[in-house]
Each structure stands twice: as C-alpha cells, then as structure tokens.
Amino acid sequence: MNKKTVETRRLSLCEEKAYPISDKLYGIFLEDIGFAADGGLNANAVNNYSFDGEYMDPDTMKKVSDPLRYWHLSNGKMTFCRKGGPGVSRYAKLDVNPQSCLVNEGYHGGHYGDRPAVSITKGETYVFSCFVRSEGYEGNIYVQIKDGTGNALTKKGTIPDAEKEWQRLRVTVSGISSGYGRLCIAFDGEGGLDMDVVEFYCADHWGATDPKWHHGRFRRDLIETLQALHPAFLRFPGGCIVEGMDPDNSYHWKDTVGELWERKPKFCLWAEKQPDGGYCQSYQIGFYEYFCLCEDLNMRPLPTLNAGLACQIRKEVHSFDFQDIPLESREFEEQIVQDYLDLIDFAKGDPETNRWAALRASMGHPEPFFLDRIGIGNENYGKEYLAKFTKIAEAVRKKDPSITLIMCGGHKPQRKELDPYWRFIRRRYPNDLLDEHSYHSPEWFERQAHRFDNYPRGTSKVYMGEYSANDLHSRKEMTIENTNTMASALGEAAFMTGMERNGNVVEMSSYAPLFNLIDSENWYANLIDFNPACVCPSANYYTQQLFGKYYGHTAVPLEGELPQKVHAGVYVSATKSEDTLYMKAVNTSPVPYRLVIDHMPVKNGMASGEILQCDDLKAKNRLAFEGEPVMAIQPREVICTVKNGKLEMILPPQSIQGTALKIQ
C-alpha cells in the first residue's frame, strides 16, 4: 500500500489519564435456541433419548406429549409406559424379533423431516449405553451407525442377554467410515424388551477424564470454540426460555439437576419456529453442567431465573392468554422466590446442612461453585416486573448480601424505553446492574459508539446482555443473507470500542444468540453456526474473539481527531495490563487510513496483532448441513511499527484490528 496516497491521522496516548475498567466486559450468552443444547452442546446424539418428548402444538402453542417421536421400529411393535422405569420418566416397550430394527436419526434441526444426522469420524471411538429390562426377550442386542443407504459407518457393538431387572448396559464402537448416519438397534432373538435413557456419544467429549462430568456431556469442538473467545462469564439458560409461555413452560432449574433420568423435560419455547413444534429441552445439559463449564473455562456464572412473568413479547404478538404468577400469592413465594434462595444453596451451600448442596455433592462436586451474581427475569418490563424484582431482590439480599443483581430493562434499545428502569435502579439499587438489549442495524451500532459516554459514574452499571447488528428493530428485515456479514461485524466493533472506553460504566456484555444448528432457522443472526460434524464461526465471532484477546483492565484515553461518520469512520480504543498495551482500531470506511500514535510507553520494533478485513460488506462465512464451512472472513496476522514512542498503524478499508505491545 502506497503510504503517500493514504490519509494520516495523529493521536496521542494519555497514559496519565488512565482509569480502571471492568475485568468482566466480554462474556457469552447461552440460550437453548437454534438447538444449541440438544443437537448441539449435548454430546448425546440420540433425539428423544428417554422417551419423554414434550413438544409444542403449533396451533395452540400448548404442550404435546409424544414419547415415541423420532423413533422408528420396523418389523415389531413399540409402545410406551409411564410406570416402573429407572426413574420418574416414561420408557419404551418393544416387541421384537430378528427382523426388527429400532432407528433414531439424531438431530436435524426439525425443519426438513427425517434424515441421518449422527456424525461419525473414521477411527473415532463412540459409546452406546441404555437401560434395558427383559420382558421375555432372550438374545443379543446389536448397535451400529448406518448411513442413509444402509452402509455401516461403525463397527457393530454387542450387548448380551438382558436380565429381568433394569440394567444400565454399555458398549463402545469405532468409526470405520466418516459421514452421517442413524442409530440402528437390532436383535437376534424375539420377545418383549423395555428400554430407556438411550445414549450415543463420542468418547472424546469435553471432560471425558474428569469424574464430575458423568451426567450431561458436552461436544468438545463446540466448547473449544467457546474457550477461544476468552470469555469472562457465562449467562445461562437464556433468554426467552427463562420466561416460557406460561409458569409450566418456564425454565425451572430444579428440573435440570440430579440423575439424567430424574430430570423433567419440557418443550422449548422456540418450538414455535418449527413446523411440527418439534423442539424439546431434555435437560441433559442443566444447571450443574453449566456451573461445571464455568469452572472449566474460568468464567463467572450468571444464572438467570424466572421473575414470575411469562414471555411479555409474545403476549404482545399472540392472542393466547399467557398466565403469570401473581405477586401476592403462595405460588410466587414457593415457586419463584424460593428458587433463587435454593439456587444459592445449590451453588454455595454446605452439603452437611443443606439438601440442595448435598445434591450438588452427590452429582460429583462437593466443593462449592463460585457464584456472585444472579439475573432476575429476562427482557421483562412494566410496573408488575419492578414490584416482583423488588420482592425477589429483598429476599436474595437477606439470604446473601454479596450477590450482585441484574435487573431487566425490557427489550428495546431506545433510551426513552430504558429511562424508567435506569431511574428505578439508580435510586434503589445503585450497586447492581441493568440489562440493556439492542438488536438493530450495523449503521445504528456505529452511531451508538458514543452511547455510554455520558452515562453517570458511581452508580448502577450496564450489562449489555444481548446485542447483535441484525436489523430487528430497524426498518429492514432480518434475513439469513443480511446477518453475520462483514458490515454487521464492523458496526458491532465500532460499538465495542465505545464499551471499552466506557468500561467503568459498562461492566459486562454478551452477543446473542450464541449457537445455531444449520437449518433450524430459529434465528437468523448467530455467533456460531454448526452442523453435526463441524463448526463455522461467524465474522462476528472473530470480532468478539479479537476484542476479548486484546484487552486489559485499564483504559488509556486517546486524544486527536478521527473521522466518525457512518460508513466512513475510524474508532479506536486502548487498554492495558501490567506489562502489555492493547490497541483496537476499526475502520468502517471504504478507504485506508494511517494512524500515528505518540507517547507510547512501548519498546521500539515490530509489534504483531490480528486483523479482520473484507472488501465485500455482504460477505459472510457459510455452512451447509453437510460439509465443511466456507470461510470468507478470518483473522490474519498484522504487523505494526514502533519507533521513538510512536506507533504506526495502517488501517485497510473495512477492517478491525487488534495489537498487543509490550510496555517497557
């Protein structure tokens, strides 16, 4: 690039004006949307594994029980039973013979009907396990993964004669060919056989050698993709599923702990996006697993619980009568407030004196989990929410004064919508956080780069709990094609420099949603797409990764003039740790710029960093249900020069750059 043709802008680093900022700024928000849990994080590839499937009736948006959905038995008879199983769940009753075959396709997003979706890699080892009980059946059970034409993808595993009492049996098989297949369970005898809690998962799952991971298991490649973000915290389990369609459908953390067969599945609110309502939360991934994951990735847990309100957005959109739990009711005290108090005990209590702490210990974690903050509700708003927040907050404060509370500010990004909640929390809860959500256009995010400059300091702080440049609240339509593009990454990056500069008032932030199983189409803008075999990080993912990697907990102001016009702006932030200075620079314009920054307390020489750049604002990384990702936008190395206290950076058009420099 010819430097003579590049406009130069000069800045000064003002180290004497440095100030401490949040050490929790960049985290992740995890909701079971887009089949993020079952079909994604959940290493078990068996769909409706415990014959407890609960789904949504698309017409009434009410619960439908369908215990045998996604299971197919040829040449035999299959029914289900509610009593006498290994736990509180239903189980399958089979009448089979040597020509019978029980098949499960796995998770295919629920959008295009049945198709093989169990991913097998040649040479990899897989585990099959289930509870079985003979009701007159004598013979072996055979387990194998076969592709759509019947070709074997794994070796055949053999389970010997089942006994008359429930047994949990296990066998391993190895991959002999790579591809997608279906779980096929065959028989060489005939008679009655009961089956429950069927699992098929890769032996090399996350935490495979750690005994605390003997309940729900995580898919390794997805967790490693999260780990590479360097997240400071994890918000779970959502999201709209926290609220649910009604009290029965809302997320109850107590349903998600204990032995797998003791957990109580329910339909996912996002089943509304599936033509057949086929989206069940099995809770194989529950609160225990989320806490363990936070521990493994060194993240602070941010559990978020229901505030006694069904999803208020859906109340506005649909004509259904979604019920809430009245504030002055026994149910509110016992089902809502008590859940918060018992969660604190589950995470931090003494197993010798508390039943919930004893449950945690029995699951494999006798030591307490770290817990210092809890979210009260999701996207809730209005006077009823403020009253319910107050009652919950007072109970939590009495139980554990060290807990920081996260209050909702609704779901709209406009300041006039947020002002009542800011006035309330600053007056009554100045040490807690307000959760702002912003879904808008890339241009809006770029204009909001100075959003937090004038927020008051020394009082309640911001949790930017959900944000994404996806056009939801703009005049455009959110589509697959206009989301997760280079344009959206640039808009978010400009906004994020503003969060860094205001890291003394913006304490936490998280992009949303996090995961998407290709073809689920629950939501069009997602940080990470995946199919059963591989992962496809978006341009927005790499932006989050860059900002999380090149970040210190002290902000250093910069002085000087930069062009700041939508689609023609340059946005810069500087932070430092004890020995490293981090520079972030975003150029949203179609022309390059040369930055010269003086008063740099760093050594002479070359400094390396990473850059995201693409000439096509519509470019995006793409993934199909089968095959490898097509990557249009990925980070590459960039080199900067430091000489006599001056840093020189070339900012190509439409680029996001992070640089680490050693402080001398």
Image (cartoon, rainbow, N blue to C red):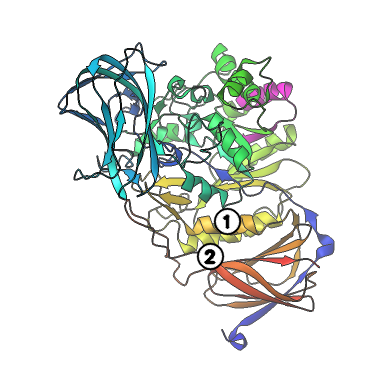
Q: Taking the image as drawn, is residue 586 in sight? A: no
Residue 190 relative to residue 329: left or right: left
> Residue 637: which disc?
none
Task: Name the kind of residue labelled 1 in the image.
Answer: Gln
392 part of magenta stretch: yes
- Pick whichever of labels 1 and 2 is earlier in the sequence: 1
Instruction: Choose between 653 and 196: the one closer to the eye.
Output: 196
Instruction: Provide the residue span drawn in magenta.
Output: 388-407
Asked if the residues shown at circle 1 and circle 2 are in contact, with their CB atoms under 8 angstroms apart, the answer is yes
Residue 223 relative to residue 448: left or right: left
> Residue 635: which disc?
2
x and y percent of residue 276 in the render? 28, 34
Residue occupying the far right of the picture = 16
> Residue 545: which disc?
1
x and y percent of residue 411 in the render? 53, 41
Q: Taking the image as drawn, is residue 187 in sight? A: yes
